[in-house]
Amino acid sequence: MPVVSSNARSVARAGDSGVKAKAVKPSKPSSVNEVPQVAAPVRVELPDGYRPSSGDSDYMGPMHLEYFRQKLLNWRNELVEESKQTIDNLREEVRDVGDEAERATRETENSLELRTRDRYRKLIAKIDKALKRIDDGSYGFCEETGEEIGIERLEARPIATLCLDAQERWEHRQKLMGD
């Protein structure tokens, strides 16, 4: 049974099982770069059609964490499946068929497929990091400020690690540096 800190702020009912899960509010970070740490999240069963909302009083409680865990795992599985299909397509392709133009077209298509696969690989690594943040209790909180990232932002980009203000500052610094 997971340890729940004394600063638990609410209790969420886990599906129809009657099991109660306590959510723990992270403490404010003592330094700007420190990420708030909480006890490992409790796994809960989500009701059909559950979607978190910003009006929920239990930000990143068990229900939110399980929702985003499932969303990330589904996304990861889709990317892995698409990567497998790319590999299978490249293996099945006949290399020495057609004229030079056809071969050139095929090579260009293969290059695009491999670049897409590389982007998937990097995205899968980010998804894995987000899943680790769920497990360590820091998911949903800005790595720079420790503030809430927000449900809407996480819905749009579940691998987000910065709140909107911190992301804008990062993008501004990148623009100034010419990257």
Image: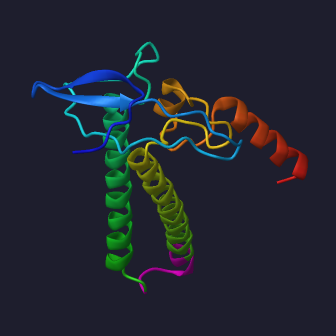
Is 178 situated above or below 111? above
Q: Quadrant of residue 51?
A: top left
Asked whether 30 or 93 is in front, the reply is 30
On the picture, is 165 further left or further right than 142? right
The structure residue drawn at horizontal position 51% and vertical position 54%, both measured from the top left corner, is 126
Give the number of marks. Answer: 0
Q: Quadrant of residue 11?
A: top left
Residue 134, image x and y in percent? 41, 45
Instruction: Name the quadrant of the C terminus.
Output: bottom right
The range drawn in magenta is 96-103
Is 40 situated above or below 140? below
Instruction: Name the quadrant of the N terminus.
Output: top left
Asked whether 109 or 23 is in front, the reply is 23
- Looking at this view, name the residue that lies furthest to the front: 6
Q: How is the image coloured?
A: rainbow
Residue 128, image x and y in percent? 43, 56
- Looking at this view, name the residue that lies furthest to the bottom: 96
Residue 59, image x and y in percent? 44, 24
Asked whether 24 or 64 is in front, the reply is 24
The structure residue drawn at horizontal position 10% and vertical position 24%, both measured from the top left corner, is 16
Is 42 situated above or below 51? below
Q: Judge whether residue 80 is colored magenta.
A: no
Is 144 situated above or below 87? above
Q: Judge whether residue 98 is colored magenta.
A: yes
Residue 100, image x and y in percent? 56, 81
Work out whether residue 24 can be spotted.
yes
Work out whether residue 49 can be spotted.
no
